[in-house]
Amino acid sequence: MHNSVVFFALSGFLAAATAPGEPAWLNEYGKARQQGAKEEKPLAVFIGSGQTGWNQVSREGRLDPEIKRLLAENYVCLYIDTDKASGQRLADAFEMHNHGLVISTHTGQKQAFRHEGNLDNQELAHYLRRYADPGLDLQYTETAAVPRTSYYQAPAPVNIAPTFTPAFGGGFAPAFGGGGRGGC
């Protein structure tokens, strides 16, 4: 009886542990920065809303196993839930008004990559592989080029050239060449 109670109590702790290949999501920026510095791993900051809002960064609506593995092995993962007031303040500090991703150095001092909106899993894996090196020498922050689609019809071309009709019979007398006033 005693052993089963201890096993039952410990099973609650084991269930809370992260499964192999799954990222361990932190929800406090200060702790994520400390852990990143300690482990010398860059930070992957996912911004979304709801209990599993990190999935909103994926265009497919879920992070595939390759992305989860990349995150678990190479990053300190932080999830900012904008449904919470503290999460909304932190998203505002990152100047993110929607869901998105920020990858920073292991110290959190420099941003390597930022993207507001979602990416397909292939693009997401590309950026995670690219910035996994904690010793990466950053010169600038990269942003993903997102193709824009316009649903508005382009306006018809407008002729803005002025119309000019020369007057040859009185009125305006051009002074070309010699004879008359001015001249060249």
Image (tube, rainbow, N blue to C red):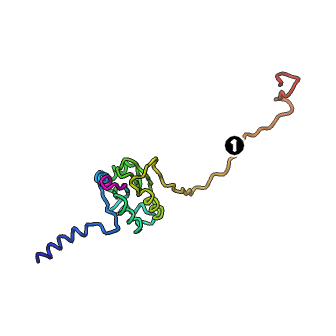
Residue range corresponding to the magenta coloring: 35-42
Asked whether 37 or 26 is in front, the reply is 37
Asked whether 2 or 173 is in front, the reply is 2
Q: Position of residue 126 (x, y in %)?
A: 47, 61
Q: Secondary structure at mark 1?
A: loop
Q: Residue furthest front?
A: 135
Q: Position of residue 44 (x, y in %)?
A: 38, 56
In the rendered structure, does residue 36 fall within the stretch colored magenta?
yes
Please tell me whether residue 167 is drawn above or below residue 41 in the rendered image: above
What residue is pinned by disc 1? 160
Q: In which quarter of the view is residue 8 placed?
A: bottom left
Secondary structure predominantly adopted by residues drawn in magenta: helix
Q: Which residue is drawn at the image coordinates 47% and 51% (left, top)?
A: 142
Q: Quadrant of the C terminus?
A: top right
Q: Position of residue 12 (x, y in %)?
A: 21, 69
Q: Residue furthest bottom?
A: 1
Asked whether 151 or 46 is in front, the reply is 46
- 117 displayed left or right of 34: right
Please tell me whether residue 25 is drawn above or below residue 168 in the rendered image: below
- 151 displayed left or right of 114: right
Q: Which residue is drawn at the image coordinates 47% and 52% (left, top)?
A: 143
The answer, for residue 98, to whether it is visible in the render is yes
